[in-house]
Amino acid sequence: MRLTKTFKAFFESEKAGGLLLLFVTILSLCIANSPIQTQYIAFWETQLGPHSITHWINDGLMTIFFLLIGLELEREIYKGELSSIKNAALPIFGALGGMVVPAGIFLALNFGTLTQNGAGIPMATDIAFAIGILSLLGNRVPTSLKVFLTALAVIDDLGAIIVIAIFYTSTIAFVNLFIAIGILGGLFILNRMKVHSLFPYLIGGVFMWYFMLNSGVHATITGVLLAFVIPFGDGGKKTSSYKIQHFLHKPVAFFILPLFAIANTCIAINSNWHEGLNHPNTIGIIAGLVIGKPLGIWLFSFLGVTLGICVLPKDLKWKTLIGAGMLGGIGFTMSIFITLLAFKNDGEEVITYSKIAILIASFIAGTAGFFWLKQTLKKPIKKTKKIEII
């Protein structure tokens, strides 16, 4: 299986970005529990206009992240691994299982409680972290595993976006929502009229984001919607879609996601932090990510292949898929993002304990996935030079 240049660029940027995310997360946690703890946490809560710095990052800059996710998804649908039912079926089934089973485990522990709204938290996979861990295994990783995990994570993020739109929207200001939809319709007309200049789409996207922000629907949804009205054409280097996608790779991987990680992991961990881990909410998050993710991904993939809907690539084994499922349990970015939405009215303590649970679960999932794959993947055969004796 050959990888396209676009996919290679995406994989490489996400690989380095994942390692950077790990570094800044550890750094942020250290500073948040240092002598300058109060000033550090207060900085991220500083008001800039109507919102805090953290809010602008979460609702503003993360829209750009979702724009990139939308562009990647569009490319995969038109030209990549999701362009045919045969290729797309396995990661689709895997992603579905990786959302349903973790959410089911969480709800089994939290149904009827004040924290049942957090069912979407263990459904997400962090692309950057998952690929960053996979990259540590070097050239022993088969191409099909890279493609499977990346496609699964992209579909997973799409599922998370749908969950955000449906379940984490409280009150809706319909006038603002209709204006945002109207702008989207106008941009779609420009697309059909073959207007390829990026300028009107980006300006329209900014206005659409503003009205979406004030509609009650989470503003980051704008990023995905905008991605699908930007002209794709033949997907070549001269197309608008390719240009903006190529441009966004590095800013998202090396600036936006690290900034999100720093702002949202400035967690002051007190001496009794472990007491929050025996709550059904935190148990549900950890169990959902560590157990539910690999179980759901493997089980649904197995059912899909058994029913003849999916095909397991020749260089993938079922035990390898378990390792991919473990890496799928690294929730981090999207899980924290959904936590902020799910518990925005439930107090800082619930959010803090949920973040700690996500960090613990992501660490366990990433470590377990790395060592599992290290044991199950074959080491590459080293080519030896022939020595001629004269």
Image (cartoon, rainbow, N blue to C red):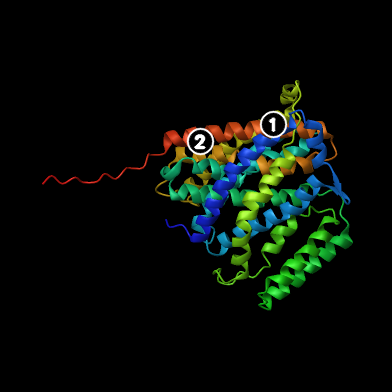
User: Compared to 273, does 309 lie above or below?
Assistant: below
Q: Position of residue 370 (x, y in %)?
A: 50, 36
Residues under numbered marks 1 and 2 in contact, where contact means CB atoms less than 8 Å apart: no
Left or right relative to 132: residue 179: right
* The residue positioned farthest toward the bottom in the image shown: 193
Residue 156 can be seen in this image: yes
**For the residues marked 1 and 2, what is the alpha-carbon distance in whole angstroms?**
24 Å
Q: Mark 2 = which residue? A: 370
Foreground of the two, 205 or 182: 205
User: Compared to 197, does 89 lie above or below?
Assistant: above
Residue drawn at x 74%, y 59% as measured from the top left:
222
Residue drawn at x 81%, y 40% as measured from the top left:
43
Residue drawn at x 84%, y 43% as measured from the top left:
46
Residue type, mark 1 in image: Cys
Secondary structure of the residue carrying numbered label 2: helix
User: From the viewer's perspective, is the residue at label 1 or at label 2 nearer?
Assistant: 1
Q: Mark 1 = which residue? A: 30
Q: Position of residue 197 (x, y in %)?
A: 67, 74
Secondary structure of the residue carrying numbered label 1: helix
Residue type, mark 2 in image: Phe
**Earlier-in-chain disc, 1 versus 2:** 1
Q: Quadrant of residue 220?
A: bottom right
Number of labelled discs? 2
User: Compared to 375, does 278 lie above or below?
Assistant: above
User: Compared to 176, does 42 lie above or below?
Assistant: above
Q: Quadrant of residue 199?
A: bottom right
Left or right relative to 122: residue 183: right
Residue 105 can be seen in this image: no
Q: Position of residue 322 (x, y in %)?
A: 50, 38
